[in-house]
Image (cartoon, coloured by chain):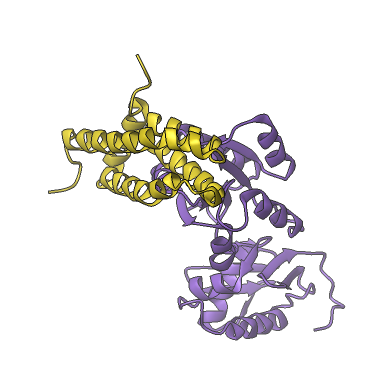
């Protein structure tokens, strides 16, 4: 299910938007500030609905920082704000917003705009592929093959690898991995994530040698990217 | 004929969301009541040093009111937001703000009470 990140400090509007999107079949994760989003979630959402006026860091400041930190994968962002004057619209779009909706958002229009932006970014709810050459996943057997040969992995390693491949191209936070893969509270030491990642990287050639590169993104987490295979890469 | 207290279109949307999620309407009204309780006192403080807080509170109240369809309250809150730097203008608006908040809450409760509950028995 596609997930929308809603950054909105008005509890009434937050409740209204959440229910409207969930009725349309979208999952919603709501945050009361940009800081809360950054602390709790990286890589969990497919699109951000962003209020302009937020406590602490404003929506426009958050968007500028978000865009500066992006290298390849671009997070779709729609601004939600009570102020629809031209200057503000232009500022939001120039800062990198994909669309702009004046509050209070009309439910059907909001859903239509969200779906339109997701389509433009080619983000769909289609079944996740199992094939990431040279790797092939068999979810029912919880098995992964490399060049047709089974790779021996622990249960946790398999879950981690599957999670990362399903989100290839996106930054996935350590806290997200702890919550979604380890199913534990994210305030536990994240060294265990780093250790598992390091093992997978070596055993599966996720250093570029296999055609995939799993890199650490400072202060954020990890990102798995397709690259030109380089058999000469050393660990 | 002036602006209605509550927007019919917004009430209809809330009613349709109640059908999707029983309890939604009452939860939304409770959140709005909470927002009024939090922001109204901040809007009404008239000491000069409270301008930014007053403006922020008026903006927040405007947003919550508009979200639930309380048109007149949203309009008065917007006037207060724009006049936040002027204590005399704020003093003139404070009576209307209180009155519209009370009327909006009363009409929302009356509307909710007149609707059949979608909650399962």
Position of B63 with respect to A75 (left or right) is left
Q: Quadrant of residue B19?
A: top left
Left or right placement of residue A197 versus residue B7 in this view: right
Q: Colour of chain B?
A: yellow
Using residue B108 as the reference point, say whether residue A99 is left or right of it.
Answer: right
**Residue A21 visible in the snapshot:** no
Task: Please give the letter of the chain rendered in purple.
Answer: A
Direction top: furthest residue: B1
- Tell which of A198 and B25 is nearer to you: B25
Look at the picture and state if A96 lies above or below B7: below
Residue at the image position 36 percent from the left and 31 percent from the top: B10
Q: How many marks?
A: 0
> Which corner quadrant holds the C terminus of chain A?
bottom right
Q: Residue at x 42, y 38 (%)?
A: B67
Q: Is residue A184 above or below residue A85?
A: below
In this view, the residue in front, B45 or A66, is B45
Does residue B97 appear to the left or right of A157 in the view shown? left
Residue B57 on image: x %, y %: 47, 47
């Amino acid at each position: 299910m596609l997930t929308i990140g809603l950054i909105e400090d008005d509890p009434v509007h937050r409740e209204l938007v959440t229910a409207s999107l969930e009725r349309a079949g979208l999952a919603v994760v709501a945050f009361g500030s940009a800081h809360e989003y950054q602390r709790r979630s990286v890589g969990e959402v497919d699109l951000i609905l962003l209020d302009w006026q937020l406590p602490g860091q404003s929506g426009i400041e958050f968007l500028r920082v978000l865009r500066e930190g992006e290298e390849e994968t671009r997070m779709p962002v729609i601004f939600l704000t009570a102020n629809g004057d031209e200057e503000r619209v232009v500022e939001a779009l120039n800062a990198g917003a994909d669309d702009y909706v004046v509050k209070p958002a009309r439910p059907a229009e909001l859903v239509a705009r969200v779906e339109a932006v997701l389509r433009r970014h080619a983000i769909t709810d289609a079944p996740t592929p199992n094939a990431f050459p040279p790797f092939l996943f068999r979810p029912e057997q919880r098995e992964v093959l490399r060049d047709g040969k089974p790779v021996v992995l622990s249960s946790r390693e398999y879950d981690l690898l599957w999670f990362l491949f399903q989100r290839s191209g996106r930054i996935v936070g350590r806290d997200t991995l702890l919550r979604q893969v380890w199913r534990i509270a994210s305030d536990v030491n994240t060294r265990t994530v780093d250790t598992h990642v390091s093992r997978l990287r070596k055993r599966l050639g996720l250093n570029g040698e296999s055609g995939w590169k799993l890199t650490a993104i400072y202060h954020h987490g990890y990102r798995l990217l397709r690259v030109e295979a380089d058999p000469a890469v050393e660990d | 004929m002036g602006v209605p207290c509550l927007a019919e279109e917004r009430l209809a949307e809330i009613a349709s969301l109640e059908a999707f999620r029983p309890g939604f309407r009452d939860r939304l009204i409770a959140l709005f009541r909470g927002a009024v309780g939090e922001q109204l006192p901040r809007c009404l403080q008239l000491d000069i040093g409270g301008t930014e807080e007053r403006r922020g509170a008026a903006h927040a109240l405007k947003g919550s009111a508009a979200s639930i369809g309380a048109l007149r309250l949203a309009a008065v809150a917007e006037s207060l937001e724009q006049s936040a730097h002027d204590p005399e203008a704020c003093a003139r608006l404070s009576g209307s703000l209180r009155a519209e908040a009370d009327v909006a809450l009363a009409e929302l409760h009356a509307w909710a009470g007149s609707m059949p509950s979608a909650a399962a028995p």
